[in-house]
Amino acid sequence: MLKINSKAPAFVVPSTTNNKYSLKDSIGKYVVLYFYPKDDTPGCTIETNDFNKLFSKFKKLDCEVYGVSKDSLKSHNKFRDKYKIKFDLLADEEIKVLKKYEVWGKKKFMGREFMGIIRSTYLIDKKGKILKVWDNVKVKDHAKEVLETLQNIIKNKK
């Protein structure tokens, strides 16, 4: 995993607003990047819906939220429309961002090994530095934990 206080790797990828999204676009705001394996699968849907429910609270803290997977924009748009997701999903079909953030790796499932996305979340500060990393995320209450972490960081800065 990338180190806390290191600079978050820059990237540009297609986004569900039909634009390219660049991490540089978010300088001046906090950013949550959560990496998830696949659109519209049980764990990923729970995680995404939880971030969606708390999205207005993240916005109030001047924080943007982005879900990242290797699914296509078409898949992301279907997922977003089905669950009325209020934030952008980023399509990393070439696995470049996943590798930069060290969330692409060997996984085991039902006795077989394969390469895939290790469910992880990065919290990035307003200058583009990594504040916190969660790896091998358990989806239950994860979005709430990320929000509470951000609230505590902001409170401790005052």
Image: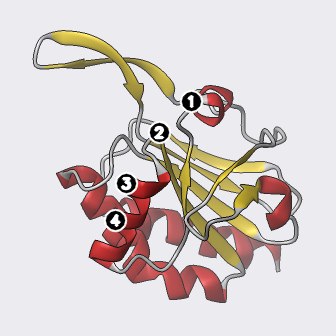
* Residue at x 81% of width, y 73% of height: 157
Does residue 7 sit above or below 30 in this rendering? above
Does residue 152 sit above or below 69 in this rendering? below
Mark 3 residue element? helix
* Residue at x 53% of width, y 74% of height: 87
Q: Nearer the viewer, mark 4 or mark 1?
A: 4
* Residue at x 44% of width, y 80% of height: 54
Q: What kind of residue is marked 3?
A: Ser
Color theme of the render: secondary structure
Q: Are marks 4 and 1 in contact (CB under 8 Å)?
A: no
Q: What kind of residue is marked 2?
A: Lys
Disc ID at residue 146:
none
Q: Position of residue 8 (x, y in %)?
A: 78, 43
Q: Nearer the viewer, mark 2 or mark 4?
A: 4
Residue 140 appears in the picture as rendered? no
Q: Nearer the viewer, mark 1 or mark 3?
A: 3
Query: Who is closer to the viewer here, 134 or 105?
Result: 105
Q: Is residue 139 left or right of residue 57?
A: left
Mark 1 = which residue?
95
Q: Label 4: how many residues lie within 10 Å, few (<14), some (14-19) or many (20+)?
A: some
Mark 3 = which residue?
75
Q: Are marks 1 and 2 in contact (CB under 8 Å)?
A: yes
